[in-house]
Image (spheres, rainbow, N blue to C red):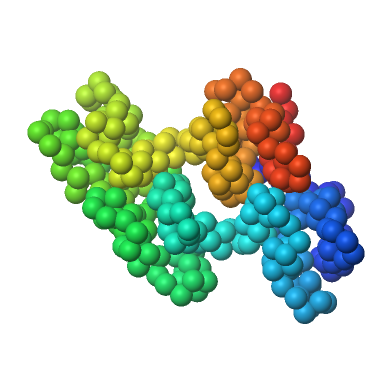
């Protein structure tokens, strides 16, 4: 369930484009107007605003925003105005080819998306950056992590809720034999099962593993694998069980301790606002006894804070 709040009566995309242009004119940028418009419009409406702005002013709104905004507010806004596939493609490209390689971020995006989302994102990545996603994965990763990511982006998976109990039990036994039952680990079996099965199936495998072997599959993954390969498997397992709980934990980790991981905070807030942010907020409050809005407010400031809180929305607790 999305957290985006949209006015009951919307102005036209053309009028929004005109208002944005006025906000850019003069000395300094009227960031309040920019946020009030763009943070309260659905993606389809934002796309029409981009079209109208280009038609009216012969300028790309994305580039104008880049010139007018600064800091983390700019980073968050520039991701927000992209379409969902373009946003994921941009995050991946920055994680794989940016000044600082962030394989955790790349792995999170790949392993937390549905097969249909991945398919569109791969096409967008190629069109936007001129390289296949698989090429950049091969260039930046290695070993079992590389094999796993390439398999995960390349294998079509079922997205429905139905599962085959006999196949579930078979996979649970295979994973046990490939890991905890033997000396060493058969990583190929883990890669095959995790990359080929649906989330509903993997959630059932985790439950069956616990029932059959009195041990959690998550603990087995932690003991049998390591590094970014382990992180990818755990991301799939946790998203299969509850994407909202997974992202609530990512947000908490981004904001706890000294300093804030703004990259992670922006990534999750911007990509989940129109998908399941209300569920994430509920999980965050349930686990950490604090509203997500309060946490964001405490860890951010200025226009950046205002924008993120506009996306997250008010908590109803």
x then y, percent, for residue 250: 51, 36
x then y, percent, for residue 305: 72, 41
Query: Does the image show residue 268?
Result: no
Seen at 24% across and 50% down, the residue is 144
Q: Is residue 65 left or right of residue 103?
A: right
Quadrant occupied by the N terminus:
top right
Q: Quadrant of residue 212?
A: top left
The answer to whether 291 is drawn above or below residue 301 in the figure is above
Q: Is residue 116 left or right of residue 147?
A: right
Q: Is residue 101 left or right of residue 217?
A: right
Q: Is residue 189 left or right of residue 114?
A: left
x then y, percent, for residue 245: 51, 32
Quadrant occupied by the C terminus:
top right
Q: Quadrant of residue 211?
A: top left
Seen at 29% across and 50% down, the residue is 145
Single out the residue that lies furthest toward the left. 183
Query: Does the image show residue 6?
Result: yes
298, 137: nearer the viewer: 298
The answer to whether 114 is drawn above or below residue 216 in the figure is below
313, 116: nearer the viewer: 313
126, 33: nearer the viewer: 33
């Amino acid at each position: 369930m999305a957290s985006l709040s949209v006015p009951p009566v919307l102005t036209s995309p053309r009028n929004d484009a005109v208002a944005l242009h006025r906000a850019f004119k003069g000395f300094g940028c009227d960031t309040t107007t920019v946020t009030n418009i763009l943070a309260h419009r659905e993606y389809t409406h934002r796309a029409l605003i981009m079209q109208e702005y280009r038609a009216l002013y012969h300028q790309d709104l994305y580039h104008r925003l880049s010139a007018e905004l600064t800091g983390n507010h700019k980073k968050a806004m520039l991701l927000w105005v992209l379409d969902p596939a373009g946003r994921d493609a941009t995050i991946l490209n920055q994680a794989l080819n940016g000044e600082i390689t962030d394989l955790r971020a790349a792995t999170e995006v790949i392993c937390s998306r549905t097969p249909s989302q991945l398919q569109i994102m791969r096409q967008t990545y190629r069109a936007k950056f001129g390289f296949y996603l698989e090429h950049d994965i091969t260039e930046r990763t290695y070993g079992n992590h590389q094999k796993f990511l390439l398999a995960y982006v390349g294998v079509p998976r079922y997205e429905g809720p139905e599962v085959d109990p006999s196949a579930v039990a078979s996979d649970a036994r295979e994973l046990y034999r490939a890991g905890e039952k033997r000396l060493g680990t058969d990583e190929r079996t883990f890669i095959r099962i995790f990359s080929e099965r649906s989330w509903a199936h993997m959630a059932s495998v985790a439950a069956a593993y616990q029932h059959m072997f009195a041990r959690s599959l998550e603990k087995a993954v932690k003991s049998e694998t390591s590094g970014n390969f382990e992180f990818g498997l755990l991301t799939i397992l946790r998203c299969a069980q509850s994407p909202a709980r997974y992202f609530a934990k990512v947000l908490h980790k981004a904001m706890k301790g000294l300093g804030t991981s703004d990259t992670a905070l922006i990534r999750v807030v911007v990509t989940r606002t129109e998908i399941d942010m209300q569920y994430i907020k509920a999980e965050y409050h349930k686990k950490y006894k604090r509203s997500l809005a309060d946490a964001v407010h405490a860890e951010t400031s200025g226009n950046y804070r205002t924008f993120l809180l506009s996306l997250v929305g008010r908590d109803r607790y």
